[in-house]
Image: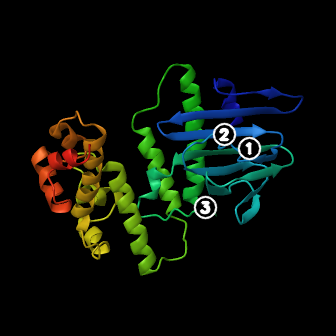
């Protein structure tokens, strides 16, 4: 990879008699790609520039050259060439090395992969298995990182479909990690948490429904209903209840706003639908609810 470093506009070079260091960094949508060759990492908290990550992200660090000692949570060890570590950015990561080390990797918002029911994103740091898929993943990241940082200087942008490809590659390598099997109760709890997170995030979008949730979780509608069978309100009811909460808040906070505007902003199709859910859940119409709360 070092042969390409002279083309990157995001490269910092430190020349020496027999050593050249570089740092590459670029973004493809929400995905951050990074790579570096340095003499020594010393000891640092949250290396590979993840200390500036504000939202919770999944960070993948692959070793190309040298050895890197690391410690995060209860996990510690040494990364050697070909090793890949996956960590959560909310946990401190301490690294140290002696001599030249070369690393590359990526950081992706946790929400982009955590709701995929095909994989289990552990809260703890994990090592990826030494497989052909893992090696190909590292090779792709390294090559694309170089090409992306090189094209930036020429004014060319990354293809629009690149971000989904990176997400799919990450999901594929994460699917190799075998974590302790969840008990039925743990699986049910996790599924309910994922559903509630999706409802919280997307309930204001008109048309968001059970099918939307099933697609986001990569499961069938039938499985979704089966996993949440003990929810007395049902999935549609959970969405409607959250929309009523949003609408109720808007009615009080923005008294000048029309009922049609409030219903649209809360995710209801129209004011009539909002009125029906208000009567069912609160026993009053939206207009009366607003009048009772000056």
Q: Colour scheme used in the picture? A: rainbow
Q: Secondary structure at mark 1?
A: strand
Q: Position of residue 119 (x, y in %)?
A: 46, 64
Residue extending furthest toward the right: 17
* Residues marked 2 and 1 touching at CB (< 8 Å): yes
- The vertical placement of 106 against 16, above or below, is below
Classify mark 3: residues with Cα within 10 Å, few (<14), some (14-19) or many (20+): many
Q: Position of residue 35 (x, y in %)?
A: 66, 39
Q: Secondary structure at mark 3?
A: loop
Q: Nearer the viewer, residue 148 or 255?
A: 255
Q: Which residue is mark 3?
A: 128
- The vertical placement of 149 against 144, above or below, is above
State how far apart marks 1 and 3 are (Cα). 18 Å
Residue 54 numbered mark, or none = none
Query: Between disc 1 and disc 3, whose residue precedes?
Result: 1
Residue drawn at x 24%, y 53% is 244
Residue drawn at x 56%, y 40% is 32
Classify mark 2: residues with Cα within 10 Å, few (<14), some (14-19) or many (20+): many
Q: Secondary structure at mark 2?
A: strand
Residue drawn at x 39%, y 74% is 188
Residue drawn at x 29%, y 53% is 245
Residue 99: which quarter of the image?
Answer: top right
Q: Left of 169 or right of it: where is 117?
A: left
- The vertical placement of 263 against 237, above or below, is above
State how far apart marks 2 and 3 are (Cα). 18 Å
Q: Which residue is mark 1?
A: 102
State how far apart marks 2 and 1 are (Cα). 7 Å
């Amino acid at each position: 990879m070092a042969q390409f470093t002279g083309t990157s506009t995001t490269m910092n070079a430190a020349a020496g008699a027999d050593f050249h260091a570089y740092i590459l960094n670029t973004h493809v949508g929400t995905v951050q790609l990074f790579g570096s060759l340095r003499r020594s990492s010393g000891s640092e908290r949250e290396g590979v520039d993840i200390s500036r990550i504000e939202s919770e992200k999944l960070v993948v660090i692959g070793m190309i050259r040298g050895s890197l000692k690391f410690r995060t949570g209860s996990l510690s060890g040494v990364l050697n060439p070909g090793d890949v570590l996956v960590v959560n950015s909310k946990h401190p990561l301490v690294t140290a090395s002696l001599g030249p080390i070369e690393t590359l990797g990526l950081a992706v918002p946790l929400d982009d992969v955590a709701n995929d029911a095909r994989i289990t994103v552990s809260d703890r740091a994990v090592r990826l298995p030494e497989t052909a898929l893992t090696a190909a993943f590292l090779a792709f990241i390294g090559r694309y990182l170089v090409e992306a940082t090189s094209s930036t200087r020429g004014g060319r942008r990354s293809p629009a479909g690149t971000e989904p490809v990176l997400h799919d590659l990450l999901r594929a390598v994460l699917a190799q990690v075998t974590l302790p099997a969840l008990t039925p109760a743990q699986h049910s709890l996790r599924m309910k948490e994922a559903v509630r997170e999706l409802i919280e995030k997307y309930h204001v979008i008109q048309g968001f429904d059970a099918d939307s949730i099933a697609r986001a979780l990569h499961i069938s509608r039938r499985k979704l209903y089966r996993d949440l069978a003990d929810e007395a309100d049902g999935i549609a009811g959970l969405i409607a209840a959250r929309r009523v909460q949003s609408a109720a808040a808007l009615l009080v906070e923005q008294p000048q706003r029309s009922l049609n505007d409030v219903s649209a902003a809360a995710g209801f199709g129209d004011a009539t639908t909002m009125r029906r859910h208000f009567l069912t859940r609160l026993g009053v119409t939206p207009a009366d609810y607003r009048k009772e709360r000056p």
